Amino acid sequence: MGDWSAVQLADLVTAQGPQKQFLTPAIADGAQLSVGYVAMPPGHHAIPHMHSKYDIIIVVLEGNVMSLLGDNLEDAVPHKAGDCVLIPAGMPHAGVNLSTTNRVVLVECRADPSFNDDVQVLPYLDVRIKEAAAYYQGMFVEPEDRRTVLDLL
């Protein structure tokens, strides 16, 4: 049986990951599961990437995001606060903050014991994500209901 662990968000370090997301690993480095926070500033999109070895689960805490998935990011799946998303290992994807005025906050849960070791960036999709982000952000209308996941409990 492993040791238990607890951390405070204020004690954690945020850094930009290879997918150009602001990541704050909370539990990692040797655990069988890792979890961390992801903050997407207004108008931001991730660099297309995949997690080569491990599935990830994303929980949207705040904001509106579009996940683009597939070999050419052809599948677009919208999410809002309270939604949970499973992205299988090996699936090319990138998240787009649909809002140009409000942030998105997510929690990512991974079986990757170091939180980011299996990330592979996919530069051949850079043009596609820029076009898709501009398209979906241009169509997005800010909802009147801006509740976070805590407001939904």
Image: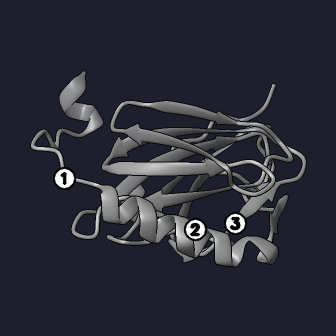
Q: Which mark is residue 46?
A: 2
On screen, 30 above or below 19?
Answer: above
Q: Is 38 positioned to the left or the right of 43 in the image? A: right
Disc 3 to disc 1, C-alpha distance = 25 Å
Amino acid of disc 3? Pro
Q: Is 25 positioned to the left or the right of 110 in the image? A: left
Disc 2: CA contacts within 10 A as few (<14), some (14-19) or many (>=20) = many
On screen, 46 above or below 16?
Answer: above
Disc 1: CA contacts within 10 A as few (<14), some (14-19) or many (>=20) = some
State the image quarter where residue 126 is shown.
bottom right
Determine which residue is flagged by label 1. Answer: 142
Q: Which mark is residue 48?
A: 3
What percent of the width, then of the height, locates residue 114? 77, 56
What percent of the width, then of the height, locates residue 20? 59, 75
Amino acid of disc 2? Ala
CB under 8 Å between callouts 3 and 2? yes
Q: Residue at coordinates 65% horizontally, 33% vertically from top-left?
A: 86
